[in-house]
C-alpha cells in the first residue's frame, strides 16, 4: 500500500518536472532549431522543432546561418572586447560589492544605516533617467568611447551589495567572535570567514553579473562611437539589422552570443551547493 | 601601456596620412550585404576623387539610431556627417546643432531644382537649408493576390471587396488602424485622401468632414476584420488578411521568409484623391564639425546626379532626385515602382515640436475611442483638435 | 578586555575602509547622476538646449494637466496592477522551482534542472517573444487550443486590453530564473543539523518546511520582495520584447501596457521632454520609497 503511494508520488513528480522542463526549455530549443533552418522554413502555423523542408518534408541540418554570422566583419574583435569588459566588470563588482556588503553587515560605524538607505534609494530611479547624467560624468572622466567606460561606470551594483549583505548578515556572530579571539584581523574575517561561507551567493552574484554584462546593450550603444570598441551585442544588433528579417540568421547570432554564458553557467552552477556545514549554531 | 601603444599608432598613422582630413559619417547598418558593397564603392570613389579626404563610415542599427544621435548630441560627441530622420531636422536645426548650408549651396551654384520638392522641403528650417535629402519612402497598400484579384481603387471599392473576402474567424479584410502610435501615423494618409489637412498655419484642423470620413471608414472596415485574426502571428503572410498598409521595408522579409506569399502592391484606395505619408532621411553636417568643407563635398557627392540612385539603393528607399527616379532599379521593379507611384501623392508630416506626442497620445487616443464606440468620430476629433492646439501653442 | 576595545575602535575604521570603494563608486556614478536628474526635473530641457528653470511646473502639470499628460495616471495604474500581479507570481514560482531543485538528490540531475530552469533568462528575447506569441496566439495558440479542447472559450491574450497585462505578468513569472537562483543560494545556506534534529523530534516534512525552511529564508525573501517590487515598478523590457515600439511609441493595445517607465522613456527620448521625464522619475521614486520603507518596517528581515 505504502509502496504504491510512493510510486504514484514519484510518477506525478516526474510528470510535473517534464512539463516544467518543456515549458522552460521550449523557446531555447526553438532558438537553436531555427538557427539550423533555411529562412523559408522558419514560419509554420505550429512551431516545429526539427528543421523540415516545407515542400519536400525532408528533415535537414543547415549550418549556413552560422557561417554567415562568423563571416560578419568585426565579430572576432567584438568577442574579445566583450570578454575583456565582462571579466573585468564582474571581478570589480564581486570585489567592491562584497567588501561593502561585509562592512554594512558585519561592522558597526556611524551613519552606516543611513548611507545604506541612500544607496538603496538610487535603485528606485529608472536607468533611462540617469542615463544622460551618467554619460556626462563618463565623458568628463575621459571614459567616453573606451572599453574602460563600459567597465568602471558599471563597476558596482546596489542590488548585488544588498543581496550579499543579506547573506553575510546570516553568518552566526559566534563564528566571528571565535575568530576574533584567535586574533584574526578584520581583513581575515572578511577573507577567511565571510567569503568562504557565502560561496552560493557569491556564485549567484558572479554568474548573474557576468550574464548581465555580457548581454548589456543600451550602455555600450550610447558610450561607444568607434567600431573597434564595439561589444558582441552591438555587433550582433548590426547583424540583426542586416538580416533582412531572416529569423534563422538572427537566431544563429543569438545562439553564438548565448553559448559562452551558457558554458559559464553550467560550470559555475556546480558551486551552488551547500556551504561549509556550520557548527555551534545558536537556536 | 596599451593606451601608449595606441597613441603611438595614431601618431604613426597620422604621419602616414599627413595632410589628410578624416570625416566621420554615421549611417544605418544596411539591410543587405550587397547594399554595404555599394556604399563601400561610393566611399572609395569619393576618396579617389578627393585625395586629401578620408571617410570613416560608422554603421549603427537603424532601430537605435535616434537614441544614439540624441545621446551623442547631449554630450557633444556628434560625428561630422550623418543621416537624420526628416522630422528631426528642424528640431536639431533649432538648437543650433546643424550647419546652415545655404551659403555653400549658393557658393557652389548647386541647382536644387533637380531634387524632388517633397523631400527637399524637409531640409528647410526658417527658410534656410540645413541638409540635403538623401532618401524618401512612403506607405502603400500591400494585398494578397490569392484573395484579391483586382485591388480596390476607391473607398467604396475597398468596402465592397472587404465584404466579399471576409470570412468570420478565417479571413479578415483589412488591417484597420488602431489607437496606437502606428495607427495615428498612418491616418493622415486617409484624411488627406478625403480632402482634409492635419495642421494649417500651426492650428490642428483634422476635425473636418475629411477626418470624420477617415475614422468612419476604419469603423466600417472593422466590421469585416476581426482583431483575433489580425492579432494572430504573421496573419497577412499566412493568408488571413486581405490588405494592409505598410512600407517597402516589409518586402525583404516577405521574400526571405515567405517565398510562396503571393502579394501585390497598389495605391492606397482614395476618396477624393490619392494620398500617402512621406518618410525618409536627410543628410546633414553638424555645426561642431572641424571639417565642414570636406563634409560638404561628401554630402554633395552622395546626392549628386551620378550617385543619388546608388544611395537610395544603399538605404533600401527611393531616390530624391528627379533624374535618379528613372533608374531602372526602381522603375522596372514591379513592386518598387508601385511605391514610387504612390510617393507622387505624398504629404510631409507636420513639424511642430510636440507632434510626436500629439500623434501618440491625442490622435491615437481618438482612433481608439472611435473604434471602441466610446465617442462618435466627430466628438473624438473635436476633443483631439482642442487638445492638440493646446500642445501646438508650445514653442 | 583591552583587546576587544582595540577591536571596537578599529571596527569603525575597518568598516569605513571596506565600504569606501563602493561609496566612491556610488557617489560618482549613482548619487551624482540622481542629483543631476533631480535638478533637470525642475527644468525644461530637450537634451540639446540649455536647461531652462521652470520650478515645480513639471510636477504640477503632470499631476493636474490631463490634456498635456493624458496617460500619467493611467500608466501609474498599469504599473501598480502589473506589480500586484507579477511580484507575488515571480517570487512564488522562483521559490517553488528552487525547492524542486533542492529536493533532487542526484547531483547530475540537479545540475540539469538548474540549467533548464535558468534558460528563460538567457534565451534571446526575440525567440522568447516568438514562442510566447505562439502560446498566446488567438488563432493557433497553444493556450487557446487547450482551453477549447476542455470546452472553454479562448482569449486574444496579448491583443485584448483587458487581459494583456495579466498575460504579460505570467511571462514575468516564467522568467523567474534569477529569483530561483537566489532562493537556491538561500536554501543551500540552511544548515543540515536543523533538519536532522527536527527529524529526530519526528517533525513531518510539512512542519519542517514551515518551521525551518521558510523562517530560515526570511532574509532572502525580504531581499527578493524589496528588489522585485522596485524592479516591477520600473518594468519596461518585457513589454518591449512582446510589443516592440508600435510606430515608435510603446504601450501595447489601447495603451493598456503603457507602464510608467515606458511613459518616462517616451517623454525622454521620443517627445524630447527630458525635464518632464525626470520629474516623472522622482514621482515614481517617492512612491517606491514609501513602499520600501513600509516593507522595511513591517516585513521580517532576519530569521531570529
Image (cartoon, rainbow, N blue to C red):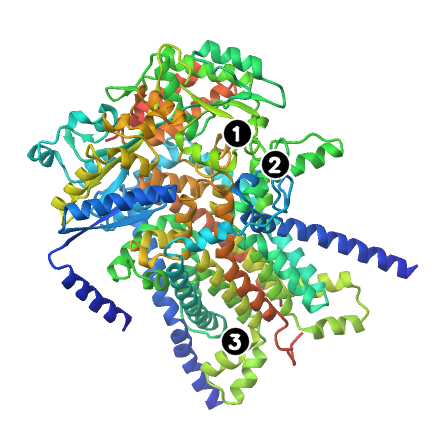
Element on which disc 2 rests = loop
Q: Residue at x 37, y 17 (%)?
A: B191
Task: Tell me how far mark 1 sits from mark 2, CA to CA.
Answer: 14 Å
| Label 3: few (<14), some (14–19) or many (≥20) C-alpha neighbours in 10 Å | some
Q: Nearer the viewer, residue A226 or C217?
A: A226
Are labels 3 and 2 assigned to the same chain?
A: yes
Q: Which residue is at a point 34% across and 67% down the rendered structure image? A: C24
Q: Nearer the viewer, mark 3 or mark 2?
A: 2
Query: What label does residue B261 carry, if any?
Result: 1
CA separation, marks 3 and 2? 59 Å
Q: Which mark is residue A195?
A: 3
Q: Nearer the viewer, residue C179 or A50?
A: A50
- The tag earlier along the polypeptide, 3 or 2, is 2
Q: Is residue B204 left or right of residue A14?
A: left
Coordinates of residue C204 in the picture (x, y in percent):
80, 64
Circle 1: element type: loop
* A174 relative to B141 in the view: left or right: right
**Residue at the location (56% across, 85% down)?**
A178
Residue under the image location 55 percent in, 77 percent down: A196
Q: Which residue is outermost to the left?
A: B107
Structural crowding at the residue carrying mark 1, measured as other residues with C-alpha within 10 Å and reported as few (<14), some (14–19) or many (≥20): some
Q: Give the label, 1 or 3, closer to the camera.
A: 1
Q: So how many labels did they put on this image?
A: 3
Is residue B190 depicted above or below B120 in this figure? above
Q: Position of residue A19 (x, y in %)?
A: 71, 50
In three-dimensional space, the C-alpha distance between marks 1 and 3, rounded to whole angstroms, equals 60 Å
Left or right: A264 as drawn, with respect to C115: left
B192 on left or right of A185: left
Amino acid at each position: 500500500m505504502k509502496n504504491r503511494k510512493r510510486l504514484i508520488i514519484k510518477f506525478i513528480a516526474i510528470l510535473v518536472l517534464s512539463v516544467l522542463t518543456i515549458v522552460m526549455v521550449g523557446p531555447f530549443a526553438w532558438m537553436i532549431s531555427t538557427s539550423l533552418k533555411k529562412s523559408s522554413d522558419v514560419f509554420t502555423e505550429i512551431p516545429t522543432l526539427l528543421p523540415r523542408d516545407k515542400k519536400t518534408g525532408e528533415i535537414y541540418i543547415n549550418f549556413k546561418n552560422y557561417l554567415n554570422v562568423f563571416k560578419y566583419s568585426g565579430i572576432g574583435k567584438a568577442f574579445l572586447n566583450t570578454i575583456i569588459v565582462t571579466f573585468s566588470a564582474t571581478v570589480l563588482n564581486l570585489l567592491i560589492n562584497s567588501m561593502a556588503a561585509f562592512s554594512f553587515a558585519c561592522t558597526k560605524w556611524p551613519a552606516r544605516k543611513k548611507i545604506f538607505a541612500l544607496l538603496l534609494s538610487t535603485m528606485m530611479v529608472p536607468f533611462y533617467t540617469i542615463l544622460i547624467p551618467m554619460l556626462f560624468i563618463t565623458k568628463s572622466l575621459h571614459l567616453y568611447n573606451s572599453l574602460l567606460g563600459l567597465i568602471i561606470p558599471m563597476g558596482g551594483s546596489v542590488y548585488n551589495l544588498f543581496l550579499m549583505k543579506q547573506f553575510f548578515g546570516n553568518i552566526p556572530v559566534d563564528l566571528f567572535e571565535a575568530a576574533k579571539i584567535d586574533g584574526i584581523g578584520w581583513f581575515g574575517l572578511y577573507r577567511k570567514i565571510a567569503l568562504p561561507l557565502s560561496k552560493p551567493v557569491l556564485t549567484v552574484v558572479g554568474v548573474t553579473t557576468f550574464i548581465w554584462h555580457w548581454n548589456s546593450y543600451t550602455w555600450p550603444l550610447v558610450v561607444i562611437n568607434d567600431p573597434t570598441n564595439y561589444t558582441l551585442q552591438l555587433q550582433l544588433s548590426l547583424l540583426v539589422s542586416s538580416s533582412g528579417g531572416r529569423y534563422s540568421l538572427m537566431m544563429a547570432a543569438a545562439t553564438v552570443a548565448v553559448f559562452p554564458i551558457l558554458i559559464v553557467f553550467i560550470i559555475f552552477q556546480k558551486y551552488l551547493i551547500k556551504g561549509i556545514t556550520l557548527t555551534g549554531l545558536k537556536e | 601601456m596599451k593606451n601608449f601603444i595606441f597613441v603611438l599608432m595614431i601618431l604613426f598613422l597620422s604621419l602616414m596620412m599627413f595632410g589628410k582630413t578624416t570625416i566621420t559619417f554615421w549611417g544605418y547598418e544596411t539591410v543587405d550585404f550587397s547594399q554595404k558593397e555599394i556604399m563601400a564603392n561610393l566611399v572609395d570613389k569619393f576618396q579617389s576623387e578627393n585625395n586629401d579626404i578620408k571617410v570613416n563610415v560608422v554603421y549603427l542599427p537603424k532601430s537605435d539610431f535616434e537614441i544614439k544621435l540624441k545621446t551623442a548630441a547631449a554630450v557633444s560627441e556628434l560625428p561630422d556627417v550623418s543621416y537624420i530622420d526628416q522630422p528631426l531636422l528642424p528640431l536639431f536645426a533649432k538648437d543650433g546643432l546643424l550647419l546652415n548650408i545655404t551659403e555653400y549651396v549658393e557658393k557652389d551654384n548647386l541647382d536644387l531644382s533637380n531634387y524632388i520638392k517633397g523631400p527637399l522641403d524637409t531640409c528647410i528650417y526658417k527658410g534656410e537649408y540645413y541638409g540635403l535629402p538623401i532618401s524618401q519612402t512612403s506607405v502603400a497598400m500591400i494585398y494578397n493576390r490569392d484573395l484579391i484579384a483586382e485591388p480596390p481603387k476607391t473607398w467604396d471599392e475597398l468596402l465592397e471587396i472587404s465584404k466579399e473576402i471576409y470570412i468570420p474567424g478565417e479571413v479578415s479584410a483589412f488591417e484597420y488602424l488602431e489607437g496606437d502610435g502606428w495607427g495615428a501615423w498612418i491616418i493622415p494618409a486617409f484624411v488627406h485622401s478625403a480632402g482634409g489637412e492635419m495642421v494649417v498655419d500651426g492650428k490642428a484642423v483634422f476635425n473636418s468632414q475629411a477626418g470624420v470620413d477617415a475614422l468612419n471608414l476604419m469603423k466600417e472596415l472593422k466590421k469585416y476584420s476581426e482583431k483575433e485574426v489580425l492579432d494572430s502571428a504573421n496573419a497577412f503572410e499566412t493568408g488571413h488578411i486581405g490588405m494592409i498598409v505598410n512600407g517597402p521595408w516589409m518586402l525583404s522579409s516577405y521574400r526571405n521568409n515567405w517565398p510562396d506569399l503571393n502579394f501585390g502592391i497598389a495605391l492606397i484606395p482614395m476618396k477624393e484623391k490619392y494620398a500617402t505619408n512621406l518618410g525618409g532621411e536627410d543628410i546633414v553636417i553638424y555645426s561642431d564639425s572641424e571639417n565642414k568643407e570636406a563634409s560638404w563635398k561628401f554630402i554633395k557627392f552622395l546626392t549628386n546626379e551620378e550617385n543619388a540612385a546608388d544611395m537610395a539603393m544603399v538605404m533600401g528607399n527611393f531616390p530624391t532626385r528627379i533624374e535618379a527616379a528613372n533608374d531602372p532599379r526602381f522603375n522596372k521593379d514591379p513592386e518598387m515602382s508601385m511605391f514610387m507611384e504612390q510617393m507622387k501623392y505624398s504629404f510631409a508630416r507636420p513639424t511642430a515640436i510636440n507632434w510626436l506626442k500629439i500623434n501618440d497620445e491625442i490622435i491615437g487616443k481618438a482612433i481608439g475611442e472611435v473604434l471602441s464606440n466610446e465617442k462618435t468620430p466627430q466628438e473624438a476629433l473635436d476633443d483631439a483638435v482642442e487638445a492638440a492646439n493646446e500642445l501646438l501653442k508650445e514653442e | 578586555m583591552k583587546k576587544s576595545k582595540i577591536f571596537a575602535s578599529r571596527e569603525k575604521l575597518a568598516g569605513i575602509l571596506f565600504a569606501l570603494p563602493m561609496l566612491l563608486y556610488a557617489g560618482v556614478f549613482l548619487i551624482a547622476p540622481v542629483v543631476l536628474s533631480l535638478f533637470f526635473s525642475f527644468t525644461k530641457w530637450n537634451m540639446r538646449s540649455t536647461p531652462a528653470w521652470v520650478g515645480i511646473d513639471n510636477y504640477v502639470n503632470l499631476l493636474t494637466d490631463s490634456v498635456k499628460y493624458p496617460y500619467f495616471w493611467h500608466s501609474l495604474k498599469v504599473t501598480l496592477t502589473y506589480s500586484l500581479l507579477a511580484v507575488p507570481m515571480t517570487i512564488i514560482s522562483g521559490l517553488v522551482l528552487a525547492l524542486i531543485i533542492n529536493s533532487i538528490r542526484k547531483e547530475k540531475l540537479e545540475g540539469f534542472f538548474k540549467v533548464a530552469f535558468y534558460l528563460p533568462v538567457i534565451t534571446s528575447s526575440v525567440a522568447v517573444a516568438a514562442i510566447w506569441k505562439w502560446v498566446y496566439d488567438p488563432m493557433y495558440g497553444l493556450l487557446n487550443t487547450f482551453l477549447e479542447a476542455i470546452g472553454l472559450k479562448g482569449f486574444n491574450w496579448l491583443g485584448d486590453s483587458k487581459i494583456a497585462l495579466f498575460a504579460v505578468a505570467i511571462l514575468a513569472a516564467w522568467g523567474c530564473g534569477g529569483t530561483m537562483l537566489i532562493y537556491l543560494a538561500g536554501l543551500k545556506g540552511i544548515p543540515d543539523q536543523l533538519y536532522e534534529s527536527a527529524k529526530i523530534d519526528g517533525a513531518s516534512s510539512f512542519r519542517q518546511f514551515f518551521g525551518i525552511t521558510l523562517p530560515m529564508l526570511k532574509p532572502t525573501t525580504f531581499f527578493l520582495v524589496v528588489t522585485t517590487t522596485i524592479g516591477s515598478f520600473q518594468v519596461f523590457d518585457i513589454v518591449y520584447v512582446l510589443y516592440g515600439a508600435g510606430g515608435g511609441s510603446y504601450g501595447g493595445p489601447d495603451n493598456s501596457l503603457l507602464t510608467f517607465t515606458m511613459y518616462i522613456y517616451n517623454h525622454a527620448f521620443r517627445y524630447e521632454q527630458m525635464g518632464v521625464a525626470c520629474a516623472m522619475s522622482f514621482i515614481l521614486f517617492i512612491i517606491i520609497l514609501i513602499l520600501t520603507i513600509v516593507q522595511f518596517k513591517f516585513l521580517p528581515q532576519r530569521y531570529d
